[in-house]
Amino acid sequence: MTTVFEQMGGEDGIRRLVGRFYELMDTLPEAATIRAMHAPDLTESSEKLTLFLIGWSGGPPAYVEKHGHPRLRARHMPFAVDDDAAAAWMRCMGLALEDEARSGAMEPAVAQGLFDAFLRIAGHMRNR
């Protein structure tokens, strides 16, 4: 049985997904609210999300080794994560997942399963 990490294309696949996600966040008008929650340079955010997803999906636990337990909700508490912010995050991630599936880099069923999991996480991150 393969891990989600492997189904996502390993580290390279996750880096590609996260890169596309942040490209969309940086350019989609409907993502302006969540983009404003990030530093002007997205390099650190991109690396943290990449490392988190690698470990979350069953790959090496690099995020935990470098930053400790993810504590996602606590780490996002300083930001106003409301329904609109969660929807904007999901819009960017959904499009990035669609791109991965459309390119053949990820099976459509894997992309859909990830979308569903991220939707639950985005709902959990809401704090307003």
Image (spheres, rainbow, N blue to C red):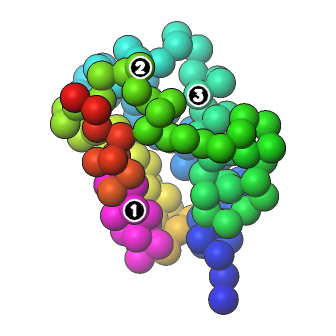
Quadrant in which the C terminus is drawn: top left
Give the residue pinned by disc 1.
117
What residue do we see at 33% from left, 57% from top? 120
Give the residue pinned by disc 3.
45
Q: In the picture provided, is 80 more to the left or to the right than 72?
A: left
Q: Residues within 10 Å of mark 3 (few under 14, many from 20)?
A: some
The type of residue carrying mark 1 is: Ala
What residue do we see at 71% from left, 39% from top? 68
Tags 2 and 1 in contact by the CB under 8 Å rule? no
Whether residue 87 is situated above or below residue 115 in the rendered picture: above
Q: Nearer the viewer, residue 109 or 57?
A: 57
Q: CA distance from mark 3 to mark 1?
A: 20 Å
Say whether disc 2 or disc 3 marks the residue closer to the N-terminus.
3
Q: In the picture provided, is 124 more to the left or to the right than 47?
A: left
> Magenta segment range?
108-119
Q: Residues within 10 Å of mark 1 (few under 14, many from 20)?
A: few
Instruction: Specify whether residue 98 is in view.
Output: no
